[in-house]
Image (cartoon, helix red, strand yellow):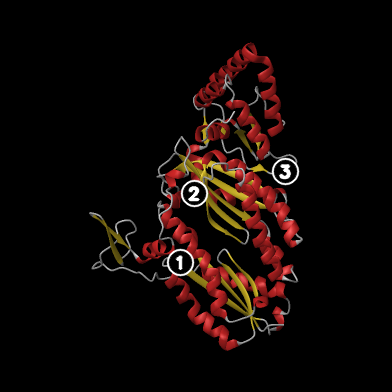
Amino acid sequence: MAKYLYGASIQGIQEFIFKTNQLQEIIGASEIVKSLEYEFKAFANISDENILLNAAGNIKALFDDEENLRNVVKNFPKKIMQKAYGITLSQAVVDMTKAEYDTYEKAINALEKKLKTQRNKPSIPLDISINLMDLAPKTARPVAKIERKGNDEIRMDVSTAQKYRANPTNKGQLSDLKNSKGKIAIIHADGNGLGALIPTLSNIPAFSKGLDKATHEAYEEASKVIQNGKIRKIILGGDDMSVICDANDALAFTQTFLKKFEELTESHTGHKLTACAGIAFCNEKYPFHYAVSLAEALCGATKKHAKNIDKKLAPSSLMFHNIQSSNFQSWEKFIEDELTIRNDHDVIRCDFGPYYVAHVGQPSIEDLIDVVKVYQQEGSPISRLREWLGELSKSHHYAKDLLDRINENSAQNDKKALDTLNLKLKKVHPALGTQTMIIPKDGFDKTLIYDVLQILSVTEAKV
């Protein structure tokens, strides 16, 4: 058994990548982050068999040589932080010669506790500024490079200059990814239960390689649903995925990715794993760091919901939100400020999700998509239901009367279409229907209509 278990956690990756809305910089930052995986392998001077995990900013490795380990702990953070200004590295070591760490499971659990402590310690940025320094206007960090393009002068900090070097060819803009409504989607997905599973494995390196392969293949399979190629992968490795894509295809892409992730992890690792995802819809000019924070918060919210369903292995699911406010503070504040309706009789929540790949008793992504397609049909009552949602914030009784009139008119115009819609709604949840748009769910009164309206407002009709 090796003497030492080493762990490192690279922090600030999302902020480093999405600090800008320039696609050239985003892709350059992504390339830098990807290259960090190779930096450890070259620097550590240990065999591949001793590298247990090296993906998505997480590193775990075994060392026999104390002097080599000391060199890594002392000098590796400097190398990483200089290669990617704005990123920090937390490290921890467990001495496996001690009796209390006689198994990998005990050692890894102890390592994770130490890493958590280290991650909570503040770090000093390498490009710290003082008042005398000239600051780059886009980032407010010290200017390190000045480029001239025609009559324009571009003043860049170190981080921005690094991103341009990593992606010197300016191929494509974020505007190339938007749909006709100007909407794009930021999707963040993360595997479930890895922290509990990894310490129990007998061959962690083989598992890590299989997991990485499964994630890449799941992405490739999911990308096939995007016919126009409007997608850019930003982070893809281990059990993590972050992409930017056309808002039209975000739901179908994420649904396919989650399905394939389950299938391919079982095929490549021998363990059927699940994942959760968050989708933030926004305009191309919306500050990306807010959108990314929301996508991560949505992913975290669906993980929490899924773990309550199955504490052993949370089922695959997703949540989404169309950003309409100027900034993002927290998902809970969004719920309070934008997704809670209070009238003279009720308090109704509009966050109906999460939506699951396949789990009995929970709304499915497929059934949600089917309902959206019905409401996309010409002659559907969706515009009147938008009016109903507005009326709901004023009066319970007026909203009920309006819903009754909507259903009466729909029955007169096309009874068959209304019956179809009713069946589709009941597939999402047995209590839902054209007459019951508000139902008890997760301890609250909730309505599905807001989520349907969100999807319709950010996507183009395909029917």
Measured as percent of width and height from the top left, residue 340 is found at: 53, 36
The answer for how far apart the CA atoms under marks 2 and 1 are is 23 Å
Contact check, label 3 and label 2, Cβ < 8 Å: no
For residue 419, above or below residue 35: above
Mark 3: secondary structure: loop
- Amino acid at the residue labelled 2: Ser
For residue 436, above or below residue 89: above
Choose the circle earlier in sequence order: 3 or 2: 2
Give the residue number, with chain letter if any, for mark 3.
358
Left or right placement of residue 443 versus residue 157 in this view: right
Give the residue number, with chain letter if any, for mark 2.
330
Mark 2: secondary structure: loop
Choose the circle earlier in sequence order: 2 or 1: 1
The structure residue drawn at horizontal position 70% and vertical position 80%, both measured from the top left corner, is 100
Choose the circle earlier in sequence order: 1 or 3: 1
- Amino acid at the residue labelled 3: Ala
The structure residue drawn at horizontal position 63% and vertical position 59%, both measured from the top left corner, is 239
The answer for how far apart the CA atoms under marks 3 and 2 are is 28 Å
The structure residue drawn at horizontal position 49% and vertical position 26%, both measured from the top left corner, is 390
